[in-house]
Amino acid sequence: MKQWYETLFEDYGKKYDDESFTHGTIGECDFIGKEINYDESLKIIDVGCGTGRHSIELAKRGYRVTGIDLSESQLERAKTKAKAQNLRIDFQKHDARDLPFKNEFDLAIMLCEGAFPLMETDEMNYEILINVTKSLNDHGKLIFTTLNGLFPLYHLVEEVCASTTEAGNATYRSNTFDLMTFRDHNITTVEDDFGNKKELECDERYYAPSEITWLLKMLGFKKIDIYGAKIGAFSRNNKLTTEDFEMLVIAEK
């Protein structure tokens, strides 16, 4: 039986690229470049790359990128876009809980909830972090965004999603946030690239900053910084607050 996130991303490449939360790619890649001192010799893995928006922008800037995703239709869209721009990017289909790489990459990015934290259990989400960590070399760096567990303690998620959704974008309703598990259950309605409407029962894990810090420390990361994640404007100057829907995590081995 397919999970909701597998069904969500089927035939959803073009529509996904039109979603409001995908419009910050250039600014986000500006930040990534600065974090690695614009060193084009470094190897980057983009986990949950989707339609390849970060992979493609980084490749345009001269970086060597491998993009992995579970969705064949998202990967096909990514390959088509890269080919149209004559970019060589190694797109591969993999489950982020079971990656074949060991000590291969200098930087891993995992942005916009492409994999973590969509899994059904905390253990599965942790498996993603384990596999991404294994993919990095001894001095590797991990940059990812995840849902900020402080946010739903102060806000109704459904109201915020509705206020930031543009016409034609995915909609979210019947949100219920469980204080014991920090999971938000909601019904997401999306229209795929062929005009078919899909209604999905979704289940996403929000994380407290202290949880993320502890998980990464257990995996051997020595330096862990967490900030508020502003779409298209990642910055180390954005102190995490209860107003941030997502948090930006930067971890170094």
Image: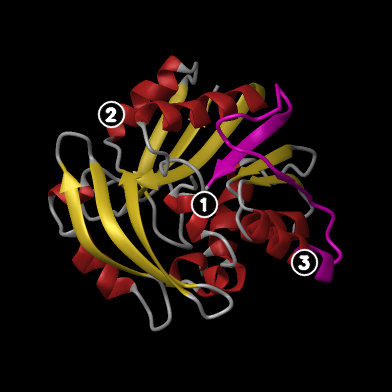
Q: Quadrant of residue 213?
A: top left
Please give left or right for residue 163 compared with residue 13 in the image. left
Residue located 35% across and 74% down the image: 165
Q: Position of residue 192 (x, y in %)?
A: 52, 73
Please give left or right for residue 83 compared with residue 133 in the image. right
Distance CA(mark 2)–CA(mark 1): 29 Å
Q: As shown in the figure, which amino acid type bears the numbered disc 2?
A: Ser
Q: Position of residue 188 (x, y in %)?
A: 34, 64
Residue located 58% across and 36% down the image: 96
Q: As shown in the figure, which amino acid type bears the numbered disc 3?
A: Thr
- Asked whether residue 52 appears in the rendered view, the answer is no
Distance CA(mark 3)–CA(mark 1): 20 Å
Label whose residue precedes the other's in the sequence (3 or 1) = 1
Distance CA(mark 2)–CA(mark 3): 40 Å
Residue with the mark numbered 1: 6
Label whose residue precedes the other's in the sequence (2 or 3) = 3
Q: Secondary structure at mark 1?
A: helix
Q: Is residue 95 magenta?
A: yes
Residue with the mark numbered 2: 210
Q: Is residue 61 magenta?
A: no
Residue with the mark numbered 3: 80
Q: Which residues are magenta?
A: 82-110
Q: Position of residue 237 (x, y in %)?
A: 38, 49
